[in-house]
Structure formats: structure tokens, C-alpha cells
């Protein structure tokens, strides 16, 4: 079985540095064997949000760009998880839940397809341990005018 970093490399991805919080909260909380990751926006490798991932999905942001933004959010979630537990291969038991918030234009209801960008990445990287429960909602605004924000919960080894 390949490692998480090897699977990321096969996808042409590397984990970014875990982003610092942009307000008064912590990026993750570990309690027992659970790690809850605060919402992560779609920062790219340079630590900024690309113009195509800023604004409302179904408006200035295409559903395809929204799905790519959700994928970036999931990558940032994994970076926070690594900051919380160290070696992902030794620690991750299961992605328990993802929560997706889609900055939606009025009338845009295809939020589930956008959130698949995050869900698909979890399964690609973690295999069957990446399969998770999920909620996805369209919202009026997100921090930094991000198109997507994703939060998560993982079960980890003690």
C-alpha cells in the first residue's frame, strides 16, 4: 500500500503549510481519538485565494472552478490534520465527516457537485478510510470572499 504522501505525489499535489487562523479560533481541536478541523478556505500553494476561486459559485465562479476550490480546501484540511497529528500514515483511522459551505449565487443549487471536489480528494488520498458522512450548504458569504470552505472531523490513533 502506498503512503498518503505518495498518493498525493501521484496526483501532482503536496501538502501546503497549515494556514494560520484568520480570526479568534484555533485551526483544530483534538479530543480523545477525534480531531476536528476548523473550516479551511481555498488557499492555493502560494497561500492566497486565486481570482477564479473568489466570489459566488454559479455567478462569477463556475461550478468547475468551485469544485477545484473545494479540492484545495480538502488539501488544506489535510495540512491541518498533519499539523495536529504529525505522520498521517501512522495516525489517520478514518475521515468521519466533511462539512462544505459553498458561496452560492442566488438560485444556484448544485452545491453537492461542487463539494464532490473535496470528497473525491479524501477518497483518492485516504482510500476507503476517506469515505465520510457529509453536509453541504449554500451560503450568502464566506470569509475572504472564498468560493468554498470545508471543515472536517477525523478519527485518529491514540
Image (cartoon, rainbow, N blue to C red):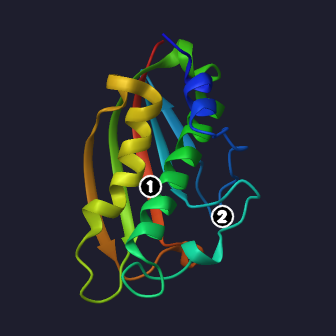
Task: State the residue at coordinates (71%, 65%).
Answer: 48
Nearer mark to the viewer, of 1 and 2 = 1
Residue where numbered disc 2 is placed:
22
The residue carrying pointer 1 sits among few (fewer than 14), some (14 to 19) or many (20 or more) residues within 10 Å by Cα, namely many
Question: Residue 57, how many percent across, how many down?
Answer: 40, 78
Say whether residue 82 is left or right of residue 136: right
Task: State the residue at coordinates (56%, 17%).
Answer: 3
Question: Residue 87, how many percent across, how many down?
Answer: 63, 19
Front-most of residues 69 and 34: 69
Task: State the residue at coordinates (52%, 38%).
Answer: 29
Regarding mark 2 in the picture, which secondary structure is present there?
loop
Task: State the residue at coordinates (65%, 57%).
Answer: 21
Say whether residue 118 is left or right of residue 91: left
Give how far apart the Cα atoms at labels 1 and 2 are: 15 Å
The residue carrying pointer 2 sits among few (fewer than 14), some (14 to 19) or many (20 or more) residues within 10 Å by Cα, namely few
Of labels 1 and 2, earlier in sequence is 2
Residue where numbered disc 1 is placed:
150
Q: Give the residue furthest to the right.
A: 46
Front-most of residues 155 and 55: 55
Regarding mark 1 in the picture, which secondary structure is present there?
strand
Quarter of the image where one finds residue 4: top right
Label 1 with label 2: CB-CB less than 8 Å: no
Question: Residue 148, how many percent across, how many down?
Answer: 46, 66
Front-most of residues 144 and 72: 72
Disc on res. 16: none
Question: Residue 93, how many percent across, how many down?
Answer: 40, 19
79 vs 105: above or below: above
122 vs 41: above or below: above
30 vs 118: above or below: above
Say whether residue 56 is left or right of residue 90: left
Amino acid at each position: 500500500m502506498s503512503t498518503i504522501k505518495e498518493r498525493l505525489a501521484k496526483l501532482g499535489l503536496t501538502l501546503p503549510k497549515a494556514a494560520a487562523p484568520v480570526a479568534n479560533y484555533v485551526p483544530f481541536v483534538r479530543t480523545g481519538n477525534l480531531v476536528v478541523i476548523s473550516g479551511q478556505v481555498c488557499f492555493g500553494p502560494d497561500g492566497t485565494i486565486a481570482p477564479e476561486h473568489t466570489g459566488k459559485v454559479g455567478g462569477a465562479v463556475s461550478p468547475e472552478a468551485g469544485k477545484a476550490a473545494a479540492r484545495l480546501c480538502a488539501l488544506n484540511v489535510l495540512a491541518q490534520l498533519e499539523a495536529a497529528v504529525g505522520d498521517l500514515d501512522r495516525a489517520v483511522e478514518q475521515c468521519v465527516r466533511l462539512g462544505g459551505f459553498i458561496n452560492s449565487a442566488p438560485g444556484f443549487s448544485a452545491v453537492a457537485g461542487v463539494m464532490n471536489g473535496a470528497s473525491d480528494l479524501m477518497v483518492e488520498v485516504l482510500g476507503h478510510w476517506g469515505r465520510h458522512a457529509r453536509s453541504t450548504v449554500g451560503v450568502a458569504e464566506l470569509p475572504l470572499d472564498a468560493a468554498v470552505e470545508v471543515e472536517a472531523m477525523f478519527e485518529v490513533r491514540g
